[in-house]
Structures are given as structure tokens and as C-alpha cells.
Amino acid sequence: MQFLPTDIDRRDWATLGRERFEREYVLPLRPIVVRGGFDHWAARDKWTLEFFRQHHGSRVVVVDGKHWRLEDLIDQIRVSSPAAPAPYLRNQLLSRWAPELLADISPMPECTRPNWLESRAIPALQPLTYIELFIGGTGASFPILHYDNLHTHAFLMQLVGEKEYIALPPDQEKFLYPAEGVASNKSSIGDVSNPDLARFPLFEQAEGIRFKLHPGETLFVPAGWWHTARILSPSITVSINGANRANWPAFRKDFVVDRGRSSRWRAELIRPYLFFLGAFLMLESRFDLL
């Protein structure tokens, strides 16, 4: 497998702007690291490991099935190392875990707009936009190579520490051994840094990029791009998923399949509805740019 180092564009949002970002990165589904996208956040200076230890240390969190007091977990994160990585607190939905923290990360970076998942017209019982928190220590890794569920985009805002990402475009899927069924967006390869090539020989042909994400930077992972990460220093990250005209057809297809598992007739009704909803949301987005 080949992972070309630092082969990713990096741009300052002040000079990039929304129209160019959409034209050069969103529509062609190209990843990019954006600098200066969330300097307006209170969390930019406020959120540290010590902040979470002092103000939220008594919270109980669950990591890989084990319950921790957050203050105890943070103590482990401080001394984490590649040889003995601390448990990685990941995918914590802030609206459930600590909704009061949402004020510190509002509004979302302009590069995440428009986000069609926020439309109240989407036929879902619960919001499809997930704002999630990740806190981990040196040496910890995201446990699986994957692309985001329902072919949504991912935006990852790095507040503290550094991470190293590996990302592969959708055309590399044939080398990545996707799982079957509902988990088809996840690779069966356990450790992409030390893969079992006897079991997964095609992975040796995979080509992707390897790069670092630094504090103050936002990573845009387009829909369908496979990715995973390891932590290089104690890290705090916030993520949000999204949809717009670039990934709406793929999202629509996945959403219909997902709803069809519980009701086939409902899926058949949703299919044309989402098609016309996408046309409406596209017009709405164009007016927003004017």
C-alpha cells in the first residue's frame, strides 16, 4: 500500500471562500485542510484536557464497553503512549452528552455550510446531523478504516493536539475489503498500519494519502472517502457530518436503502420525495449565496 505523505491541499479560509471551496473541493469530492475556519469559537482557547477534567470530570463515559469517570480517563490520556495507549473517547454526541457545550462551538465553520441534513423536511424521526466530541491520548487510534455512514461528508475540527490521518478515495474500495450488509462502509482490515497481507493481499495495491491535522485546522473528508486516524499528542477534536448537492444522490440512495429495511413501501415513497427535496434545497442554497 502507498500512502503519500502530506499530499493534501491546505488553504486559509479567508482567501479560499465558500464559492471556491465548493467549486474546487466539494463538488469534485476532494479532501482539503482549511485553516482559520473556527477562530470565532470560544472553545478554540477554552477547551483543554484540564477544562474537561475540572468542569466535566464527574461525568461517566463509556469507551469500548468500559465505564470511566472522565477525570480518571483524562489522567490516563495524559500519560498515554504508543506502547500503552489510553482508551480513546470518541463519537460522543454533544447534544446528549453535554448540550451546554454546544454554545462554545457555535456557529459551525462556514465551510460546513450549507448542510442539507439540517432541513426539517427530511423524513427522519431524529436529526441526522451529528456534532461529536473526540478526546484521546498519544498512540491511540480510531479503531477502523471507514467512510461515513449514509455517504455524508465529514468535517473534523482539531482544537488540541495533532493527529495523523490516512485517507483513500472511493475508487480504492476494491482493495479495502468492505464488510457485508449494513457495515459495508467499514473495512474488514483491522490495523491498516500493520495489515495481515496474507488475509488481505489486495490491500497492498491500495493508494491513498497520509497527512497531519494541527490545532486550528478543519479537515474536509468528502463523502465516500475511506479514512482513519492515529493520535500523535493529547487531542481534542469536534466533528460534524453534512450533505449538499455534491453527495445528495449517494445520500439519497443510502437513506432509501436504510429505511427500506423496516418498510419497503415507505422506502418507495421516500425515493421520489428526496429527489424533489434535493432540487428544492439546491435552489435554497443558491439564494443563500446571493
Image (cartoon, rainbow, N blue to C red):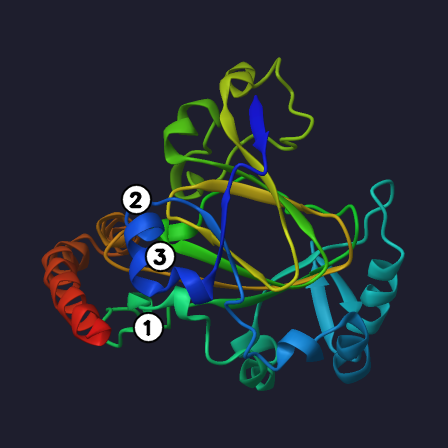
- Quadrant location of the C terminus in the rendered image: bottom left
In space, the residues marked 3 and 1 are separated at their CA atoms by: 20 Å
Residue type at numbered disc 2: Pro
Quarter of the rendering containing residue 237: bottom right
Q: Secondary structure at mark 2?
A: loop
Q: Residues within 10 Å of mark 2 (few under 14, many from 20)?
A: few
71 to the left or right of 264? right
Q: Is residue 246 left or right of residue 97?
A: left
Total marks in image: 3
| Residue underneath mark 2 | 28
Q: Is residue 251 visible?
A: no
User: CA separation, marks 2 and 1?
Assistant: 22 Å
Residue that numbered label 3 is attached to: 21
Residue 265, image x and y in percent?
14, 56
Instruction: Say which quarter of the image contains residue 192.
Output: top right
Q: Quadrant of the N terminus?
A: top right
Query: At which x and y percent is residue 274?
Result: 16, 60
State the mark number for residue 177.
Answer: none
- Name the amino acid type tagged 3: Phe
Lower position in the chain sequence, tag 3 or tag 1: 3
Q: Residue at x 37, y 48 (%)?
A: 223
Image check: 75 left or right of 149?
right
Between the C-alphas of marks 2 and 3, the distance is: 10 Å
Which residue corresponds to mark 1? 118
